[in-house]
Amino acid sequence: MIHQHPLAYLIGLEGVALLRAFAGQHGEEFVAARLAEVRALLDRADELGSGGAAAELTSAEAYASWAAAYDEPGNQLLDIEGPLVRSLLDELPVGVALDAACGTGRHAEYLAELGHAVIGVDSSPDMLAVAQTKVPSGRFVEGDLAALPLPDDHVDVVVCALALSHVPDLKPVFAEFARVLRPGGSLVVSDPRGRLGDVGLPIVVSGPDGRPGYLVNRSRLASEYLSAALPLGFEVRHCEEPLRPSPFVDPDGVPPGAPGAAPPLTPSRTPPSIWSLHPLIPDAANAAYEGSPMAIVWRFQLTP
């Protein structure tokens, strides 16, 4: 169970922005504006609401509510991560490809276009159904990353996109990738970075019963991926950490990908929508997120 309070998040962003000013990135006028904004936020505490609690969901439960809309335009993370992953896939020879945690099949679809025979594995039946419609020739199977339903030495490429932040331990998952890959095969991994450095904020979503739930969203050090991959014989061929767009929120306070400013807040006892809060303090949000990585993208190769 977590408790998220909108005022706590906003004051937290102000604090990060002030620390950046303390480090010399902003001047006296910026500091004065942030302190005044903190006072104003404290005066609006009742208007912002008291936040609320959410219970932990499984990946399948969380993604069930996202399946229908996951591919809609405006997801800033997908817009940045997708081209980087596709550029790495373009370099690989055609063979049998596994899209592990395939979701709606956005990478499986591209692999099929490149000529690969595609297998998709995911824990969410709802996401798998969408993926199957995109790649009718693919084989899509419900399964777990730590126990992939495939034989040894079965595929030439494994892609695992934006999913490892949800698993508690990387090592058994990388061991499965190594097991199903043929020697010399490639592993392409992307993962989100914490919204604020190493802080992986839980993703709040409606649970199966309609009540707020959350999906764990870990932000890992690069060394954690390496300690899981290198002992298994993986070698690093590429690593990239794309930064968040700047400004993170435009001067009119519109969140990235949104068609217009967020609607006014209504006080509630439910966890806040992060995206609805950023427009309230655009200067602090921009300063807090400036220069922070949005994702990490790897290509490993399994040594023969």
Image (cartoon, grey):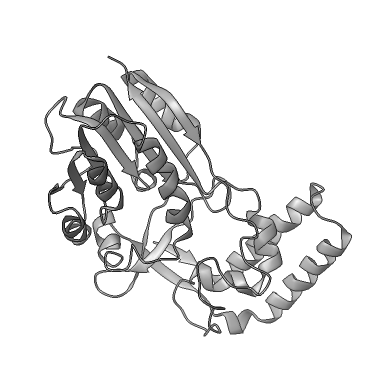
**Which image quarter is the C terminus in?**
top left
Q: Nearer the viewer, residue 61 or 65?
A: 65
Answer left or right for 292 relative to 139: right
Q: Is residue 152 visible?
A: yes
Q: How far across and down, in percent of the image, does residue 120 sit?
A: 19, 46
Q: Residue at x 30, y 53 (%)?
A: 106
* Image vertical order of residue 240 relative to residue 134, above or below: above
Identify the residue shown where x is 34% and y is 62%. Answer: 71
Q: How many marks?
A: 0
Towards the viewer: 68 or 8 = 68
- In the rendered image, the residue lying farthest to the right is 28
User: Can residue 101 be seen in the rendering of this structure?
Assistant: no
Q: Residue at left 69%, top 75%?
A: 41
Asked whether, in this view, residue 188 is left or right of residue 121, the answer is right
Task: Give the answer, above or below, for where 136 lies relative to 175.
Answer: below
Q: Quadrant of residue 178?
A: top left
Residue 79 percent coordinates (x, y)? 45, 55
Asked whether, in this view, residue 216 is left or right of residue 126, the answer is right
Task: State the quadrant of the N terminus.
Answer: bottom left
Residue 198 image offset from top left, x and y in percent: 54, 45
